[in-house]
Image: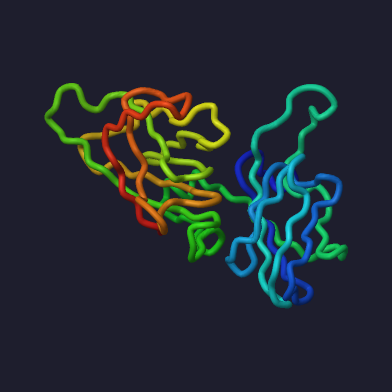
Amino acid sequence: MKLKQYQGFVLYRTMLPRSCKNPTALASLFNGVRDRAYVTVNGVFQGILERDKEMSINITGTQGAQLDLLVESMGRVNFGRYNNDFKGLLTNLTLDGEILANWTMYPLDIDSAVISGHLLKTSLNTSNSTSPTFYKGSFLIPSGIPDLPQDTFIKFPGWTKGQIWINGFNLGRYWPARGPQVTLYVPMHILTTSSLNNVTVLELEHSPCDTGKCIVEFVDRPILSKSKTFIRQEQIFKRT
């Protein structure tokens, strides 16, 4: 609340106070990560801290290395004793029992960054496909065909968890492993036949781009399980 960030992501950054040559415990006291933190050291992915699931991970790094936690809000509880559901890092983090201090906090307006084309490269982009990374692509819908564009759906073969924008419109989160939906709805009014349609993906965990096809797929009906696939066309991406 103090950061005036009511949804989305906040980047927390500090420096390692000492070298951790061997895996060293980075822990969230009292389940204080709300709701999911993607941890990197000098841009190298270390692991995920998650509310009610993973309160400690092991990290490595040298003294003075940049420790980043990209903290994601997953939505708010609206009942019971957790009704006042604040987000971000609510308690201290410790490194091998030592409280980490001197945090710098960056509220991230990712919707505006996607629309403007400034994709926060210094904050989120890394050199591998196993940490939060933006991907961009485009596709063309032929003009002159009376029934195009139409409503469609998009699925994410090989992608893990993240968000997607088409022509600056935030379609929402994808997380096929937890579902239940495998696809996201793409309304026809955000698509165009007069120019390229731009697609931006923020993959938070692991993309297929280093090991397989760097694509998403447009399908002609929703998939609420993994039993059927109806492929309409493919979209090729490049990392920004």
Q: Is residue 150 above or below residue 48?
A: above
Residue 188 visible in the displayed image: no
Number of numbered discs overlaid on the protein picture: 0
Q: Residue at x 46, y 45 (%)?
A: 159
Q: Residue at x 27, y 24 (%)?
A: 150
Relative horizontal placement of residue 159, taking residue 14 as reference (left or right): left
Quadrant where the C terminus is found in the figure = bottom left
Query: Residue 43, image x and y in percent?
Result: 58, 66
Where in the figure is residue 54, as x and y percent of width and height? 74, 47
User: Height in image: 175 above or below 20?
Assistant: above
Q: Is residue 175 left or right of residue 183?
A: right
Q: Residue 141, percent across and down?
A: 21, 36
Quadrant, the N terminus: top right
Residue 9, x across and y down, in percent = 62, 47
Please tell me which residue is depicted at 54% across the width and 37% down the height of the picture. 177
Check the image and tell me how it is coloured: rainbow
Residue sitting at x 63%, y 39%: 7
Q: Is residue 93 above or below residue 232?
A: below
